[in-house]
Image (cartoon, rainbow, N blue to C red):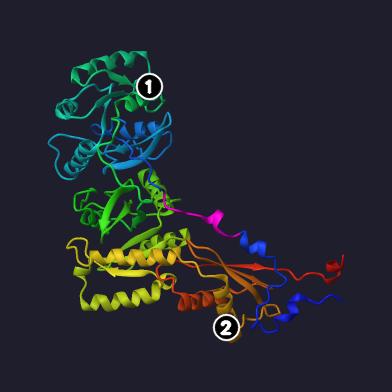
Amino acid sequence: MTEDPLADASDGSELDGSWFDESEWMAFDDAEYSDEPDGAGAPQPVLAVVGRPNVGKSTLVNRLLGRREAVVQDTPGVTRDRVAYDALWSGRRFTVVDTGGWEPDAKGMQASITAQAERAMSAADVVLLVVDVQVGATEAEEAVAKVLRRSKRPVLLAANKVDDQRTLAEAAALWSLGLGEPQPVSATHGRGSGDLLDKVLEAFPTTPREEFAATGGPRRVALLGKPNVGKSSLLNRLVGEQRAVVDEAAGTTVDPVDSLVELDGEVWRFVDTAGLRKRVKTAQGTEYYASLRTKAAIEAAEVAIVLVDASEPLSEQDLRVISMVIEAGRALVIAYNKWDLVDDERRQKLNKEIDRQLVRARWAERVNISAETGRAVAKLAPSLRAALDSWDQRVSTGKINSWISDVVAAHPPPVRGGKQPKIMFATQAHPRPPTLVLFTTGFLEAGYRRFLERKFRETFGFVGSPVRISVRVRERKDPKSSRR
């Protein structure tokens, strides 16, 4: 009779992989799970899309990109920050920057939105002014055109909403703006968008105005949290300028806003996202698309900073955002903002809330900051590096099996169905996030898997990174089949 290979591991204290085909666990390795940062290629020219509110800028941006990226709604003023997207046309890559509505003599939040558009124009290689031909050139367009004529960069004029022959004739009236030939286009139907893109490529200079060194690409950081928790204020503090629109009204940010930030001698790519109010399934209109883009920003990031208002009790929404990061498998830093408003009594309550409600994220890096005053903001960089080091970490199979042997000998898996499962082999399938695969003779209870994760962290660290444990049950082989 052929000897049963499972019989050797009598109590789980000795792991035996003799029954195991090594190629099975090797298949989990690098190729399928590689997630290297995007390499920076040649510098890309920048196209800034500007115009007054509700002329169809974001719709036209989506048409130029060939995909739905910018948030679009009938309500004027949906886009508030300047938001950059990668575009490709005729084999050439460039960046499209969508902006909020540009209005002269604006006040309040609209003044901040206008300032963002002006910054986009000053940094762009080509400016595209979008005008609604069904309304014609207004005083706002004339004011913008006056500014653009004085600028030292190419300007294109897009006559939008040219849906038929009648409106095509109305586009000719825009010659009065003094910006050259109006390019008739229908952002909704796509009419003339290809010709417009050809004109954009012709207008681009040989060398972009701004260049960034290609060093493998900055690490990608998603800035998350519920509305009005201070995400945009923190981004502006890090950048050192009014990069994102900040207002007392909750929900000012709608689109994710990308910014290159130099922090502690290293360049990072920060993405400020919309505050999440509701689940994606129950959100409507702008909130729905903002939720989708926030989720996409998490997927595209390597590490997330979740801002929590330390002066208020932890909310269900705070926990939901943290859960989204964990489920996406991204490294995590929790930043307790508005720490300057926290007194001793609130600190004691917060510690109890953390112990009780953040059980799933006890491993996360934590920093107490104030975006308003700049308190301890410099501590974010070391926390980000520590979290990413754990996220990138890989432990050798030999060390893992030595560790699991000791753990199982001291604390065997609980009996299930009258039989005690045995862990025969273990390996880290891949980093980003670190994933531990256990090959066993039976199912392991969720409580025991959590115990193994805790022991794994105690031995190997992984502070700031989620750790996933996958169990693969190997059915016992039939001895008769092995003789065939």
Q: CA distance from mark 2 to mark 1?
A: 68 Å
Instruction: Determine which residue is flagged by label 2.
Output: 406
| Image position, residue 191 (x, y; %) | 40, 22
- Amino acid at the residue labelled 1: Asp
396 left or right, relative to 12: left
Local crowd size for mark 1, using a 10 Å CA cut-off: few (<14), some (14–19), many (≥20) = few
Tell which circle, 2 or 1, labels the residue nearer the N-terminal end: 1
Name the spot of residue 446 as percent of width and height, x first. 57, 73
Q: Residues within 10 Å of mark 2 (few under 14, many from 20)?
A: some
Q: Nearer the viewer, residue 343 or 4?
A: 4
Which of the two marks, 2 or 1, is nearer to us in this view? Answer: 2
- Is label 2 in contact with label 1 (beta carbons under 8 Å)? no
Tell me residue 376's x, y (percent). Answer: 22, 67
Q: Secondary structure at mark 1?
A: helix
Amino acid type, callout 2: Asp
- Asked if residue 83 can be seen in this view, the reply is yes
User: What range of the chain is rendered magenta?
Assistant: 28-38
Whether residue 48 sits left or right of residue 187 in the image: it is left
Residue 346 lies within the magenta run: no
Left or right: residue 72 versus residue 231 is: right
